[in-house]
Image (tube, grey):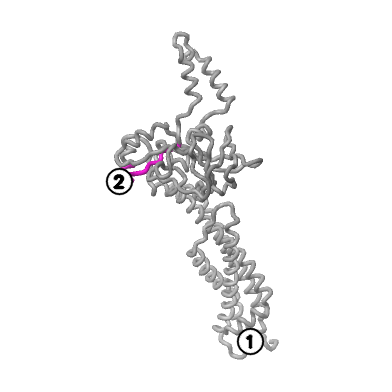
């Protein structure tokens, strides 16, 4: 039975190998799509892990800095730091924007980190692959290597240039954008302050307002103008807890007394995976279903074609007493062989193509194993059409009847 299937494959080996290669490309795309989803989830979890936070304090009734805009006064962290169970609290800003790299623009997430040190201040990049951490209060940056910058490069963010002093890895947003870490004050200016024309227009309106330009109140106008040229807002406060304190208990305390929204690690992961990545997951799932249907159609067509080409041989086998079960097994073995060839080609293609993608593609063994058995099942089901036709062949056709 095996020799019959093997001989038939060798007889039409060109068509068989070519079809297996085409099927392999489809399987490779399927594995890569699954890896893209895995990579998105892993990027989201890495984003939370690398922040070094146990709690995220954000504007009331918002989903946090990764999902939607959030604005807090930058002195909020002081009151949170005084709450029971809180070890460290630090302000942070997040801004997705285009930064200049020579003549080109690079989409990044600019992160403003509070003054401090690695391990003592939440929000700092936990490790570097080259260079050093930020030590000055202005115009230095640590960049993820995915952005393409090198040590010593200059990054244009808004009106200022920043010197790249450190490089990190796997520090990306939930959408895969590489992060650029700069001092908090610089990030506040980049995110919240207006440009020169807007500031000038705002000052003209303020000066024309009699409530702020009173002759008998010297210094009032200057104070108002000074407040308009500074920014005192951040997107979130990252909180690290003392050992032995439950995140849910501390979060409830902050919500009750500070009237702010607080998320634990599990809740923030649920927002990232359940809300931000959920839509992409549905699209990828639909794409995988389409690829599975196309793969099944290809296998069914080629096996059906091969079976049609050897109708007379099948009739001869029936004439000499070959059982239907043997013929069905021969056709099914051909379909399974086609699936194995396709999976090997697809796995090799996915392995070598994954590093070329701009976003992180995570290929895990369990997906490969599940994909292999799914391919076998698809091949078995696709061979049923050819088997049904082969079993209907009349032995008389072998002698021209």
- Residue segment shown in magenta: 235-251
Residue holding disc 1: 395
- Identified at 51% across, 50% down, the residue is 129
Q: Is residue 329 magenta?
A: no
Q: Is residue 243 magenta?
A: yes
Please indicate whether residue 79 sits to the left or right of residue 221 in the image. Answer: left
Q: Nearer the viewer, residue 48 or 319?
A: 48
Measured in 3D between alpha carbons, the distance from the residue under mark 1 to the one under mark 2, in whole angstroms, is 80 Å
Secondary structure under badge 2? loop
Q: Residue furthest bottom?
A: 320
Q: Quadrant of the C terminus?
A: bottom right
* Image quadrant assignment for residue 79: top left
On the image, the x and y values in percent for residue 374 come to 52, 67
On the image, the x and y values in percent for residue 366 come to 48, 64
Q: Is residue 314 above or below residue 39?
A: below
Q: Nearer the viewer, residue 39 or 119?
A: 119
* Image quadrant assignment for residue 250: top left
Q: Nearer the viewer, residue 47 or 335?
A: 47
The label number, if any, that marks residue 245 in the structure image: 2
- Identified at 57% across, 58% down, the residue is 354
């Amino acid at each position: 039975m095996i020799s019959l299937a093997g001989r038939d494959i060798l007889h039409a080996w060109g068509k068989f190998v070519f079809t297996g290669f085409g099927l392999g490309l489809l399987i490779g795309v399927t594995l890569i799509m699954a890896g893209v989803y895995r990579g998105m989830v892993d990027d989201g979890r890495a984003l939370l892990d690398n922040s070094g936070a146990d709690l995220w304090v954000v504007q009331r009734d918002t989903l946090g800095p990764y999902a939607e805009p959030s604005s807090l006064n930058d002195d909020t962290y002081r009151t949170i730091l005084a709450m029971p169970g809180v070890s460290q609290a630090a302000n942070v800003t997040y801004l997705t924007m285009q930064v200049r790299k020579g003549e080109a623009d690079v989409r990044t997430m600019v992160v403003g980190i509070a003054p401090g040190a690695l391990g003592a201040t939440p929000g700092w990049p936990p490790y570097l692959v080259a260079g050093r951490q930020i030590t000055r209060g202005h115009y230095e940056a640590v960049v993820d290597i995915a952005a393409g910058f090198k040590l010593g490069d200059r990054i244009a963010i808004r009106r200022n240039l920043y010197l790249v002093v450190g490089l990190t890895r796997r520090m990306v947003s939930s959408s895969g954008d590489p992060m650029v870490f700069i001092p908090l004050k610089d990030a506040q200016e980049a995110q919240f302050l207006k440009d020169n024309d807007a500031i000038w227009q705002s000052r003209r309106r303020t000066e024309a307002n009699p409530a702020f330009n009173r002759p008998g109140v010297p210094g009032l106008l200057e104070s108002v103008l000074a407040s308009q040229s500074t920014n005192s807002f951040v997107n979130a406060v990252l909180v690290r807890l003392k050992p032995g304190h439950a995140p849910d208990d501390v979060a409830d305390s902050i919500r009750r007394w500070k009237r702010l929204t607080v998320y634990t690690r599990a809740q923030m992961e649920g927002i990232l995976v359940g809300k931000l990545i959920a839509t992409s997951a549905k699209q990828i799932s639909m794409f995988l279903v389409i690829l599975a249907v196309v793969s099944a159609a290809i296998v069914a067509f080629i096996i059906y074609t091969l079976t049609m080409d050897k109708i007379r041989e099948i009739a001869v086998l029936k004439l000499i007493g070959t059982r239907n079960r043997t013929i069905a097994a021969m056709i099914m073995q051909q379909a399974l062989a086609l699936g194995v060839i396709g999976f090997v080609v697809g796995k090799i293609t996915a392995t070598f193509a994954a590093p070329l993608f701009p976003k992180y593609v995570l290929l895990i063994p369990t997906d490969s194993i599940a994909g292999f058995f799914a391919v076998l099942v698809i091949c078995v089901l696709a061979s049923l059409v050819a088997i049904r036709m082969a079993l209907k062949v009349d032995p008389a056709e072998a002698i021209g009847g």
